Amino acid sequence: MNQAISSPSLQAPKAIHLKDYLPPAFLVQQVDLCFRLDDHHTRVISRLQLQRNPARKEHDLPLVLQGQQLQLIELKLDGRTLSSSDYELTDEQLTLTGVPDSLVLESEVEIDPLSNTALEGLYQSSGNFCTQCEAEGFRRITFYPDRPDVLARFTTRIEADQSRFPVLLSNGNPIERGELPDGHHFVTWEDPFPKPAYLFALVAGQLHPVKDTYTTLSGRQVALEVWVEKENLHKCDHALRSLKAAMQWDEQTYGREYDLDIYMIVAVNDFNMGAMENKGLNIFNSSCVLADHRSETDMAFHRVESVVAHEYFHNWSGNRVTCRDWFQLSLKEGFTVFRDQQFSADQHSPAVERIQQVAMLRTAQFAEDAGPTAHPVRPESYIEINNFYTLTVYEKGAEVVRMLSELVGRDTFRKGSDLYFERFDGQAVTVEDFVACMAEVSGLDLSQFMRWYSQAGTPQLTAESHYNPTARTFTLTLRQHTPATPGQDLKEPLLIPVKLGLVGPSGQDLPMEVNGELWGQERVVHLKEQEQTWTFHNLDAEPVPSLLRGFSAPVRLLLDRSPEQLAFLMTADSDGFNRWDAGQQLALLAIRELINQQQCGAAMMLNPALIQAYRQLLDAQVTDPAILAEMLQLPSEAYIAEQYDQVDVDAIHLARDYARKTLATALYPAFLKLYQQFAKNQAWSAEAAAVAGRRLKNTCLGWLVATESEEALQLAQRQFEQADNMTDQLAALICLAHAEDTTSGDPALKAFALQWAHDPLVMDSWFSAQVTRPHPDALERVKLLMAHPAFSLKNPNKVRALIGAFVNQNRHNFHRRDGSGYALLADTVIELNRINPQIAARLVIPLTRFRRMDDYRKGLMKNELERIRAEKLSPDLFEVIEKSLAQ
Ligand code: B3K
Ligand code: ZN
């Protein structure tokens, strides 16, 4: 490792290892907090009732409490004021030795919420106070054993100026409120459920509620409240509807009822992630709560529904049963994502939901698995846990739970989850505890399965088949191989559930017979060895195997299939997901041919099989517009890049663009017909059919505009002007803004900004629409827009909408050969390192993926990483940069 510039070893923060886990030395029975809120001088008075943990036998262990950026005012042990010689205080912790087995520790600290731009702990957003404590934010509020396996009962008294902060919220139920001198007031909240500190929350400010109620299965009334700024009161209905649907679904599907009398959701504008499941008081990024069809797209509606459900589901998978330590993060996140995916599938089209999940997993999560920050679903060590709220922990973690449910069957899975929730209610547990419940109820040995939690990297699955017409047999050999990942060279075979069927020449699923056993038309085979072969009997003609139906395992399927076979599966496969995937693979094949042609200097020629397959799709009667819209999406540049060890960004962009334009031109009349069919004047509706219709219509509009024809641009212009909803308006705006000819794009962008200047969420889309423009001036636009008054580096949504969208969704411009994309990202990351380390560490990721680039770009990217490394880095950024430069 090159340590020439800043000698990072000097500042190197220490890594924490799973294998070093020890139970806490002290437990907390009761926490009583009092907040005296003030912009720069908030006082936090805490009273902790502590007791030695009987699980730790060692004698006289010291009491260690975490605390960061706290100014200690006073400390008392059992009523006696301590002096600085009675304890040891560092930047990170407070240590007391020789304390009794049972004690009361009172502390008063001062904190500065208004200067807190990291958005962790207590901070302000648009003048309101709010908190974010997961994973380790509570230590920025008061001294505490800040670890998830310490569960305590909390009361919280909040005191604040009544006119500036009329609303004072915390976890649980309000038990007392009153007036104080000098125009102040207070409210005290009590949470009856013991909880880890990461679930603590406080909100104070000028907020307004939209209220509803829900009656649980057992007949209890729960008050539902969504708290927002006044101007957003009209945007809350969808979140409330989603919440009620989620509550009902969890009762029906998992037998889980809500436990408190009140459930609150607060929307804030400055938030590092989507939302947070604090007990009884969820705090949300406003982009995941607010939805009105005039200002939010169908996609935003979907996001709101699934995030509201996700946070609600955490009340059981996360809050009632929580994690023993942060290595177990996927225990709550993977399971809860799986639950929200099941919920979405039940609310909408299961096939479309699965397609969209997999499209994301296969690009973004697979890329993570192949990059320098690859880690198992359960990491073994970390420097900064915030770096591990990743697609691997969340999405791959959900895939692992999905496989479990496939392996044991849906009913048995429910028995397993019942057992898990009952056995571990009120406890902090591990992944083993969860899997053991599934093993117990199913009788399956899941020990090999546990490797999915400990092995990083995406397994590759290859298949070979052979048909013997005389014996009428078909043999299928599956092989698995997981490539090495940083720090993990040796990989062992996994238990991979492969759902498969055999499609006969006339397009039907054939009955399968293996070793005299009748399998029916679909089966999940368990691949356990490196290589396994199955022989199917009594087949009169060669079948086409349909493998990994529904994407039954998160693997890279490497399969040589002809364009004819793929085109056949595209229409014949009985599995909706696999029909879509056959189309994706066919398009990929054709685009890869174009990339080859370009790389050897030949003229590009699009494979007619792809044009033919698209024609067939477009000519057929539209039975399912939602699926058709998915079938008509070309693989993204990111997914195409995923297929290569050496990525040629320019060739990928040109090839995909060529494929797009050629298809659009060849099939223009068919796209136009379909567009017109679904563009018929209809007022906006939230119905599934209307949502699908809009998606299909706007997909067609995108294809039409790809030809840059005058007519298509006029259609987009008309749609932009006449739209009564954001889905249509934004789709048209993007078409116009991405067109080569800017004569209609620029005025449309101007008009849009004028219309929506008052709405920060809509302005986010306006930023993204411009910086994802494929043309060479995109980077200059990013720079220009960074100076726009609506932009701020302090607001994570703005950073994601502008810089994030550019570096992740405008790949060829980010990778400009002059290196200016890299320099821009590095400059921004350096600045963000001081403002918001979590966001900085996330944003830098595309720069760390230099290994697959050509040598020239690799050099440029590494230089920028070294430039970042020369700064005084937060632990977040330090960990990511070191890992990427260590390659
Ligand atoms: N549990 C939170 C994420 C907290 C992230 C901390 N850096 C939201 C969620 O997954 O539901
Ligand atoms: Zn979650």
Image (tube, grey):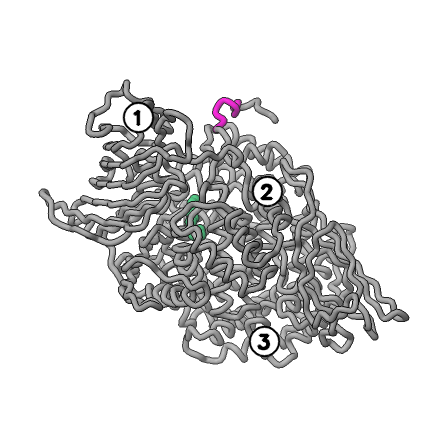
**Rendered image: mark on residue 99:** 1
Tell me: is circle 1 under 8 Å from ligand 1: no
Horizontally, residue 355 falls left or right of residue 119, namely: right
Local packing at callout 3 (Cα closer than 10 Å; few below 14, some 14-19, many 20+) is some
Q: Residue furthest top?
A: 85
Residue in the picture at 56% in, 72% down: 711
Nearer to us: label 1 or label 2: 1
Is residue 263 highlighted in magenta?
Answer: no
Q: Which residues are magenta?
A: 6-13
Relative vertical location of residue 729 with respect to residue 155 in this rendering, above or below: below
Report the quarter where the C terminus lies. top right
Q: Position of residue 104 (x, y in %)?
A: 25, 33
Label 3 and label 1: CA atoms lie apart by 78 Å
**Closer to the camera, 850 or 139?**
139
Q: Position of residue 27 (x, y in %)?
A: 35, 37
Residue in the picture at 10% in, 43% down: 182
- Name the residue tied to disc 2: 374
Relative vertical location of residue 521 with respect to residue 29 in this rendering, above or below: below
The reply to whether residue 714 is visible in this rendering is no
**Rendered image: mark on residue 652:** none
Of callouts 3 and 1, the N-terminal one: 1
Residue in the picture at 22% in, 41% down: 35
Residue in the picture at 62% in, 50% down: 449
Amino acid on which disc 2 is placed:
Ala
- Name the residue tied to disc 3: 672
Horizontally, residue 581 falls left or right of residue 166, namely: right
Amino acid on which disc 3 is placed:
Leu
Of callouts 3 and 2, the N-terminal one: 2
